Every structure is written in structure tokens, then in C-alpha cells.
Image (cartoon, rainbow, N blue to C red):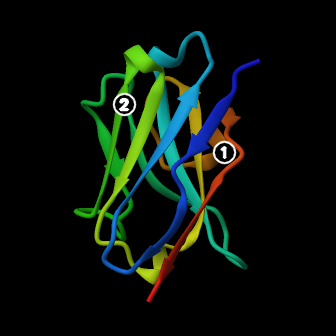
Amino acid sequence: QAQLIESGGGLVQAGGSLRLSCAASRRTFSSDAMGWFRQAPGKEREFVAGCEWNSRATLYADSVKGRFTIYRDNAKDTVYLQMNSLKPEDTAVYYCAAKRGTVTRYSGRYDTWGQGTQVTVSS
């Protein structure tokens, strides 16, 4: 069964940076669209960023545009989320997800999810 394993979360001060990684075991990872989502306590899961299999098409939530970058290394079956200029409101559990076909903001269209990694940004 396909697996996604996130890493790289932690505690960082506002203005700092973190890089999240998501390693995939799916045999077809290189042709999957990948997404990053996050969920803060008491809030619904929300889309953060996504990319097509070749990274040419990317999507970002308005709240992270210009600060976060999604990219992937298909040779390593890994997708990354570089997060810069972090804010306290970025605090959440971050999840990566995979789907066949095109990238989308809609979480219900992703069929494989990781277990999540906690990101905490202190003010």
C-alpha cells in the first residue's frame, strides 16, 4: 500500500524558516500530483500548496503565496515544502497528500495521506 511520510516539522520563531519533506513509497509517485494541507486546532483542514508531477504547474493558498515553495525530486520520490517568513498563524499539523492526475485544492480528491507533522511558530 502506498505510504507518505512527512518530516521536518518543529518549533520556530516568527520570521524563521522550515522545510518539510514528504517521502512516498507509491510506485507511481513520479506521475502523481502532490499537495500540502494543514489543520490548526479547532479549524478545518485547508489547502496550502500543490504541484503537478513535473512541478511545472503549482498552486498556492493566498495566505502562503510568496512565502512558501513546493517542489519535488522524483528521483528521490520526495516532495518538499519550503516555508519562509513563518507567522504564528502558520501553526498547524501539516499533511502531504497524493492523487492521480492534475493538482487541485480540494482535499477530497486526494486518495493517499501522510500522518502529519507539527509546525509551531512562536511570536
Q: Nearer the viewer, residue 118 or 28?
A: 118
Residue 57 appears in the figure: yes
Left or right placement of residue 17 versus residue 110 in this view: left
Residue named by callout 2: 72
Residue 60 in picture, x, y percent from top left: 35, 54
Left or right placement of residue 72 versus residue 65 in this view: right
Tag 1 secondary structure: helix
Does residue 110 lie above or below 92 as drawn? above
Displayed quadrant of residue 94: bottom right
The quadrant the C terminus occupies is bottom left
Q: Residue at x 41, y 79 (%)?
A: 13
Residue named by callout 1: 108
The quadrant the N terminus occupies is top right
Q: Residue at x 50, y 48 (%)?
A: 36
Displayed quadrant of residue 76: top left
Residue 110 appears in the figure: no
